[in-house]
Image (tube, rainbow, N blue to C red):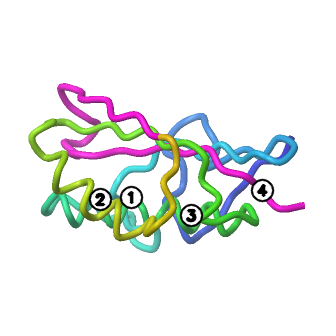
Amino acid sequence: MKIVTTLNAPQPAGHYSQAVIHENLVFVSGQLPIYPDTGEKVLGSIEEQTSRVLNNIKAILEASNSSLNQVLKVTVYVSDITLWDRVNRIYSNFFGNHRPARAVVPTKELHHGFQVEMEVMAYVED
């Protein structure tokens, strides 16, 4: 098992790792829309928040010798299911033709008033 840490994604605020690699799988912790360099919270539009979350995930995957094209499963937490179409548009732009398995979990609220959080599991190259 290997712990993954990168300065290109927000540092954990609690007792967890950005990601953990076990054999050929990487498990990326839930990512929130926070800029890694400043720690600034993105509280703008759902599109801005979704884009920041996916950029954070992309950075952690790259630090894990993986990529968005190797994502196997995504769990998306969204604070208002009526925002889903807007989240899905940004999500589709990031993943292109790649379609990982996915679950969408509507939730009453997320930490700090964020509207979206995502966690992923991906394949890691040897």
Secondary structure beneath dot 1 equals: helix
Q: Position of residue 88 (x, y in %)?
A: 27, 54
Say if mark 2 contacts mark 1, CB within 8 Å.
yes
Numbered disc total: 4
Task: Work out whether mark 1 precedes mark 3 in sequence or the reverse, and give the earlier one.
Answer: 1
Q: Amino acid at mark 3?
A: Leu
C-alpha separation, residue under disc 2 versus residue under disc 1? 5 Å
Q: Nearer the viewer, mark 1 or mark 3?
A: 3
Magenta segment boundaries in residue numbering = 102-126
Q: Amino acid at mark 2?
A: Thr
Q: Position of residue 59 (x, y in %)?
A: 57, 68
Q: Residues within 10 Å of mark 1 (few under 14, many from 20)?
A: many
Q: Position of residue 29 (x, y in %)?
A: 55, 42
Q: Amino acid at mark 4?
A: Val
Q: Which mark is residue 68?
A: 3
Secondary structure beneath dot 2 equals: helix
Q: In which quadrant of the rendered image does the C terminus lie?
A: bottom right
Q: Residues within 10 Å of mark 2 (few under 14, many from 20)?
A: many
Q: Amino acid at mark 1?
A: Val
Task: Work out whether mark 2 precedes mark 4 in sequence or the reverse, and give the earlier one.
Answer: 2
C-alpha separation, residue under disc 2 versus residue under disc 4? 24 Å
Say if mark 1 contacts mark 4, CB within 8 Å.
no
